[in-house]
Image (tube, grey):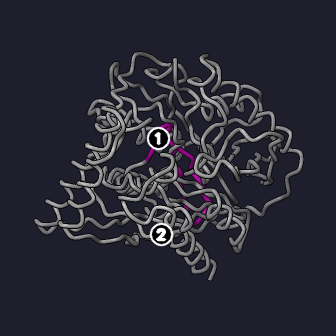
């Protein structure tokens, strides 16, 4: 017998807390709420094992915070920590939430961190206590008549996520307890006139409409592979405040239409695997890092561009100093797989590009697969080898920012650049974990 519990609570954002996203040193101080942020928890119990997913309407998750809160929840609820996952919806209009990284896309706010941690613990307990029997489950793919996203790295090919993947859990009386929906597009619609407003973006609109329209009692959005996918338009482009709502409403229309074509899933057993992995990086000497910093300082056609590259150069100088002092600037992140009967979710600690993301879903060996990026940690972009080869060095000339930026933003986390095989590394490790879990 499968039981599921759900809970959610609004995240209160302090006035003038800096919002995270849209580049470094953006200084986006919150002046109010456009679309509220929520923290949600979902408990899955097969009578032997429990899994739990905690989702927050934020841009990223943090490795350290996820590990700390996973341990606290596991201790309080007496469940296996390997079955607890932390996900973010990837809105670019929520507060920064990271532990020690000097990432400059948003200054940390101590009051919000406390709010988030206490809210996580409350909704985790509430979901645990809300568990009730599930009578059936089904899953499917809702195709999009028109993409809500566009490929920012390769606009000529414009490969985007073609469908919404969904899993639906019904109570014995037929009512829908939970709908999980999974699609890959950045949460950047609510920009421009909403630049200084808290917003859960188009994803928040989608979750709200799913409940308001009676499609499900609770909705869990998991951000799919979207490292290179922007929304097809934004509030900044349209000069109006309704773009996020319009895209979210359009998305829900496609989703609702596709719910008629689901296939039954076995409720089955819960399984999970969590593994801390050292990611492949290009290790550099202090001299090499400073040479890259000098190449950055030589860039820029105007004062604004020169300031941008000077900030990157400063971070590289700091990396050189840390390397001289013996610090290891490699990257270790958590990969996780959770199986819920006939469904399985791959939790990815960063922004995987769309093509390797589709490869992961196509090669998954069992059940109905979903890919949840920006989960359990902030590993930044997992780009394709083709993208890496296009810009082999920091001094490579970028014909456009996107494509280069995803590869060469690593210094803002004071870690080495990933190797060009980073995406295939992530996909391969997740598939190997899935195989081991089945075996």
Say whether residue 94 is magenta.
no
Q: Where is residue 368 in the image (x, y as percent from the top left)?
A: 73, 62
Q: Where is residue 385 in the image (x, y as percent from the top left)?
A: 54, 68
364 over 115 or under it: above or below: below
Read off the residue under disc 2. Answer: 420
The N terminus, quarter of image: bottom right
Q: Position of residue 189 (x, y in %)?
A: 59, 30
Residue drawn where x is 70% and y is 35% of the image: 217
Say whether residue 45 is magenta.
yes
Q: Quadrant of residue 196?
A: top left
The residue furthest right is 260
Residue drawn where x is 21% and y is 70% of the image: 285
Earlier-in-chain disc, 1 versus 2:
1
Characterize the magenta stretch by its predominant secondary structure: strand
Secondary structure under tag 2 reads loop
Q: What stretch is highlighted in magenta?
A: 41-60
Residue drawn where x is 64% and y is 19% of the image: 242
Q: Where is residue 381 in the image (x, y as percent from the top left)?
A: 47, 55
The CA distance from mark 1 to mark 2 is 24 Å
Read off the residue under disc 1. Answer: 59
Q: 113 or 237: which is nearer to us?
A: 237
- Specify whether residue 96 is in view: yes
């Amino acid at each position: 017998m499968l039981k599921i519990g759900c809970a959610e609570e609004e995240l209160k954002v302090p006035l003038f807390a800096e919002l995270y996203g849209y580049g470094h040193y953006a200084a986006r101080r919150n002046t109010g709420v456009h679309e509220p942020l929520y923290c949600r928890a979902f408990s899955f119990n097969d009578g032997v094992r429990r899994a739990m997913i905690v989702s927050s309407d934020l841009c990223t998750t943090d490795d350290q915070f996820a590990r700390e809160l996973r341990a606290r929840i596991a201790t309080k609820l007496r469940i296996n920590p390997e079955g607890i996952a932390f996900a973010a919806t990837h809105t670019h209009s929520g507060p920064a939430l990271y532990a020690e990284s000097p990432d400059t896309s948003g200054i940390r706010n101590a009051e919000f961190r406390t709010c988030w941690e206490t809210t996580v613990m409350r909704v985790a307990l509430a979901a645990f206590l809300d568990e009730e029997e599930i009578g059936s489950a089904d899953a499917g793919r809702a195709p999009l008549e028109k993409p809500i996203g566009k490929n920012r790295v390769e606009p000529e090919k414009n490969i985007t996520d073609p469908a919404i993947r969904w899993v639906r859990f019904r109570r014995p009386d037929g009512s829908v307890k939970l709908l999980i929906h999974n699609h890959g597009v950045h949460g950047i619609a609510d920009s421009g006139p909403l630049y200084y407003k808290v917003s859960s973006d188009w994803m928040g609109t989608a979750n709200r409409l799913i409940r308001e329209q009676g499609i499900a009692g609770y909705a869990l959005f998991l951000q799919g592979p979207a490292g290179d996918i922007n929304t097809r338009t934004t509030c900044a482009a349209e000069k109006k405040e309704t773009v996020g709502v319009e895209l979210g409403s359009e998305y829900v229309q496609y989703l609702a239409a596709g719910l008629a074509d689901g296939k039954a899933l076995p409720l089955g057993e819960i399984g999970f695997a969590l593994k801390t992995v050292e990611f492949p990086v290009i290790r550099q000497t202090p001299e090499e890092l400073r040479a890259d910093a000098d190449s950055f300082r030589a860039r820029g056609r105007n004062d604004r561009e020169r300031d941008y590259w000077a900030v990157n150069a400063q971070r590289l100088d700091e990396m050189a100093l840390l390397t001289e002092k013996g610090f290891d600037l490699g990257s270790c992140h958590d990969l996780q797989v959770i199986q819920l009967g006939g469904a399985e979710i791959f939790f990815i600690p960063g922004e995987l590009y769309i093509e390797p993301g589709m490869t992961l879903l196509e090669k998954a060996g069992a059940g109905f697969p979903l890919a949840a990026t920006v989960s359990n940690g902030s590993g930044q972009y997992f780009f394709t080898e083709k993208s890496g080869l296009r810009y082999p060095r920091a001094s490579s000339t970028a014909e456009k920012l996107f494509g280069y930026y995803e590869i060469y933003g690593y210094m803002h986390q004071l870690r080495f650049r990933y190797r060009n095989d980073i995406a295939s590394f992530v996909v391969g490790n997740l598939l190997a974990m899935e195989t081991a879990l089945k075996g």
